[in-house]
Every structure is written in C-alpha cells, then in structure tokens.
Amino acid sequence: MKRTSTRLLALLVCLLLLLTAVPVPAFAAERVTTCGGDCPFYPTIIVPGLGQSSVIVTNDDGTPKLDKNGNKIAAFPAYLQTDKLLQKLLGPALLTLFTQRDMGFSDAFADAIEEAFSTNKCDDTAHPIGNVMTEKFPYPYSQYSDYEVETVNHHIPFELYPTDLPRDHLYYFEYNSFGNHMDLAQELYDFIQLVKAQTGHSKVNLVPLSQGGSIVSAMLDYTPQVMDELHKVIFVVPALDGSMIIGDVFNDNITFLDNEYLYHGFLENIRLLDQPTAGLIELAARILPDDILMTALQKGVERLVKNIMTRSTGMWALCPSGDYESAAAKYLSDPASANIKAQTDRYYQAQLRSRDNVAKLMEKGVQVFCMAEYDYSLINVGTRWNNQNADFIIQLDSTSLGATSANVGETLPDGYVQQNTHCSNPAHNHISPDRVIDASTGLLADTTFYFKNQRHDLTQHNDIILKLAMQLIAHDDIQDVYSSPDFPQFNNGRNVQAIRELLATAKGVDQRMLPKAARTKLNDAIANAETVLSKTVDTADALPNAEKQLSDALVCAGKKAPEFSAPDVFTPIADRLYANYGSNGYSEMPRLTIKKALDSLTAFFGALLQK
Ligand SMILES: [Zn+2]
Ligand SMILES: [Zn+2]
C-alpha cells in the first residue's frame, strides 16, 4: 500500500513536471507571422537606450540570481549589496570618524564602488566577465510572456500607445549597455536577419533610442549591406556623436572632484532635482573631514573610470569623436589595452562617418527621421556641462545630427539667418519660434522633430514622441515635419506620467455619493485632462494646468490628500554651514569658529588701536 502510493506520487510529480514544463521559445528563424511577408506593414525593431534592456545578475552557475522577494536583479548600472557594503565600510568609516584621519576609509570606499559595478566588468578584449546575462526576446511582441511584456513596458510603455502595426511585426532588441560594442552591432545585424526570416518581409524599420543610435551607426559602417534591408529608420534622441558627459569623464574633467564646486555647484544643481536629498547629502558629507571626503571621491571615481567604464566599448561608443583621441591616449595607450583600442579606433572611424552613412541610407531610398530634445543643460558632472544646448544627457549637436543652437536661456544672435546647409526649399522656416534652434544645419533638416524643455531620461513619458513613433512605424503618411499639423517641427516636451495616474484615479471615483458641485468639478477636470492628452501639439502650460485642475477636483471630492510636501529641514542647515564654514567637515568647525572669533577680536582691537 505504502509502495503504491509512493509510485503514484512519483508518477504524479512526473506528470506535473511534464504539464508545467515551459516550452522553450524558438530562437530559430521559423516563420511566425501569418502575412508571410505580404502585407502593407514593415516589421519594426526597437533598439532601446542605455539600461533599457533586462540585463540581470546571475549565480556562478549562470542561473538568474533572485532577491529576497524572488525577483531577478538588474545589473544596470550597478549591483548594490547594501549588507555587504556596510560590512566593508563600517569599520574604516568608524575608525576614520573617531580619529578624523583616513584610516582606510577612502580605499574601502573605492573598493565598494568597484565591487558594486563589478557585474559590468570587461576583460582585456572588452567582453563582459561579470555574473550577468541579457534576457533576449528573439520573437515578436505578440509572443511575449506576461513577464516579457512587463519587462519591456517597464522601459518603454508600449501598452499605453496603440499602433496599427500588428504586434507580430514588433520586435525589441535587448542588449547589455556595458557589452562589447562590435558584438552588439553584429548581433543587431543578425537580429534583423532573424526578423526577416520570421516575418517573410525583406525590409524592416529600426527605432534606435539614445545609446541604440550608436549601435545602429556602427552596424551601418561595419555591415553596410544592411542598408538594402531597411525601409525606415526613426532615431529618437540618438547618441550619434556620443555625450559630452562621457567625453569629460574620460578626459578627467569632472566637476565634483573640486571641493568648492562639490558644495557650491554640484549639490546645488542636485537641489534643483531633489532639494531635501541634496541637503541631507551635504550634511552627511561633512561627517568626514574635507580632505578625506575628497580623497575618497577621487579614488572611487578613478577606479570606476579606469577599471569599469574605460574597459567597456559600449561606454567608449558614447564618447564624442572630438574627445576620443585624448581620452584613448589617457586610458588605452598601454599594451594591455591594445585589443580594446583596436576596437574603439574602429568605432571612432564609424562615428566620424556616421552622418555620411545616414546620408547614404537616404540615397538608397530609406526614410530617416529623428526626434531631438533641447533646453536642458547637461547634468553637471563634466566641466563642459553648460557649454552647449542639450537634453540633460546628450548635447543637441549629437542627437540632431548637427543642428545649430543657442545655449540654454539664450537665443541665436540678432540678425542670424537660416543656414540651409541641408534644406533646399526656400519656403521652409527651420528657425524655432523661440529662436534657439536652426534646424537647417542638421542633416535631417526636414525630418527632425524638436521638443523644447524635454529631459532625455524622461523621453518614454512624453506621449507625443511615442504617438509619433507609433504612427511612423505603422504608416508612411508622415513624410516630413510639414506632413501633419498634429506633429509640427517644433513642439514642447512633457511628462504625462502623473496626469495619467490622476486620471485613472478620477475615473475610478464612485460619483453617486458626491455633492453636485464636486461631481461637476471632477467631470470638468476629467474632460479637460482628456482633451489635453488627446492633443499632440503641446502649449507648455495646458498640461500643468490640467494636472492641477484634476488634482484640485480630487481633493475637493475627498479622494486625494491636499498637496503636501514634507518640510525640508536639511537645506537651511546645509546653507548656514556652507555660509559659515565653506566645505569643511564638522570636526574642523570648532577650530574654524575659534579662528573666526580670534580674527574678529584682532580686527576689533586693530580698529580700536587705530582710533
Ligand atoms: Zn507583414
Ligand atoms: Zn527644409
């Protein structure tokens, strides 16, 4: 009896295992679409930006490592193990605090930084050697599992933006941002072949975003035959000539390693983004004496740049061509780096030709579009952060393929006339209404759409950019910036994340119990928000107004707490400390206070004696 039940159990387990076994998705070039290549659409491949792929931390045996909640762990940009970090840092930190001398803190700090980023380490041939893997989806969106849909939408919210393109024609190219750039270019080329075979179509569309632009640019140069396999390329804020942030970091021109600037520039700018946090960082940073803090930062940055970033050809492809040679001389001139340098030299050539290659694409009849963003300075990490107009992450010259622009807060000089370098139609006006941009010097003068006051890292929350992209991948009716009044050459940036959430809350309100006035207010606000969201020409103030109206209506209906921001206690203290003690640490303050007192006394007696 007992034996039978054991057998039965074993059989049951076997059956269960069989039933629950997940079929391995076809990595093969089998036909998966029903159109067989005979339909008016083109399969479209999204080539996402920096960190917009699922690259996960693995165990030594290659299986995904899971966190306490059983979730996979993202390897980008770093794998922070707080417990381990604390263990390493706590001892040296306490010793340093008590003695106010660097008792191994700066080295432990640099070790901690390097270890956190070690998942993204590469060897001397620029191949990743950390415990990471890229989750690949070599089949169309229509075949994605719930997990894959969620993963991809976490980076780019496709589900929110319907497109006429059938979902079995939509593909997402996953890659490791720290990966080997030459491999990535080849992998993308191979992916295009796979998509062609799976769909039966002979040409595809590409939508490269940000870093994805560098991969497409490399592919066009390394495997130029791909040009005949493309129907349309839609660049979205592409890093075609890198980012000056990387150019500055790779040339050791970093702002915050200067202690004056750390407090009075760098953290000041962080305050614009998140004031209380910046205040708190300032207060915490003062725990350490000034010189120890700066040594720790210096060592940490040095290790990150030398051992992680400049070992990655994916990162090198983000270095502007103008900054490449000096940076390569600094970080790649030793014999051990020869292999990496051969690869980055090769990309440098592709980068110098990137605009020519795009021009070649157009000569071959490929339609090329671009979306660029402006009116933000670069994050102030590199010393040239405020030299050119940018989108917070990349300078406009790179993303617009050469548009001329005034710097943030400035306009083109009086009497400036449109250069028409890349526009031959005298009827076109390529000067932006705010007189900041001359789009005619950009290679894609007639097909580049500009978004003012739009941050690069929030692009996925600009519904207009996504709607335009969805329209372009499904239809050919938009040929240039003059094709549709719904998508003008110059538009405003926006972020619809908050208003979408408010709208969802508002629509979920059970209105039966509401007083008439509150109900009317809520319905008016819903209607206005929907109107604003339905429009693809943004008027800068319409969205914030609609958002406020909706928020007020929800408060009035008792469905939302009134706007309340926690009082910021840190910043005023940080300000007073800076005013009185500059960038000095707490331990230096008593000495400075006495010195100040003595100075005032001396001055007082000095003044007395003179009388
Ligand atoms: Zn088709
Ligand atoms: Zn034109």
Image (spheres, rainbow, N blue to C red):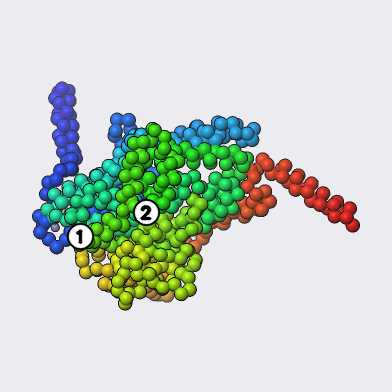
Q: Amino acid at mark 1?
A: Lys
Tell me which residue sits at (53%, 40%) in the image: 298
Q: Secondary structure at mark 1?
A: loop
Residue 377 left/right relative to 164? right
| Position in image of residue 538 (x %, y %) | 37, 70
Residue 273 left/right relative to 531? right
Q: Work out which quarter of the rendered image holds the C terminus and state it.
A: bottom right
The circle drawn on residue 364 is: 1
Q: Secondary structure at mark 2?
A: loop
Rounded to the nearest angstrom, the CA distance separating label 1 from label 2 is 23 Å
Q: Residues within 10 Å of mark 2 (few under 14, many from 20)?
A: many
Tell me which residue sits at (39%, 68%) in the image: 438
Camera-side residue of 606 and 411: 411
Label located before the other in sequence (1 or 2)? 2
| Position in image of residue 328 (x %, y %) | 41, 42
Q: Is residue 501 visible?
A: no
Is 330 placed above or below 376 here?
A: above
Camera-side residue of 455 and 543: 455
The circle drawn on residue 241 is: 2
Q: Residues within 10 Å of mark 1 (few under 14, many from 20)?
A: few
Residue 189 left/right relative to 202? right
| Position in image of residue 65 (x %, y %) | 33, 36
Locate residue 169: give its quadrant.
bottom left
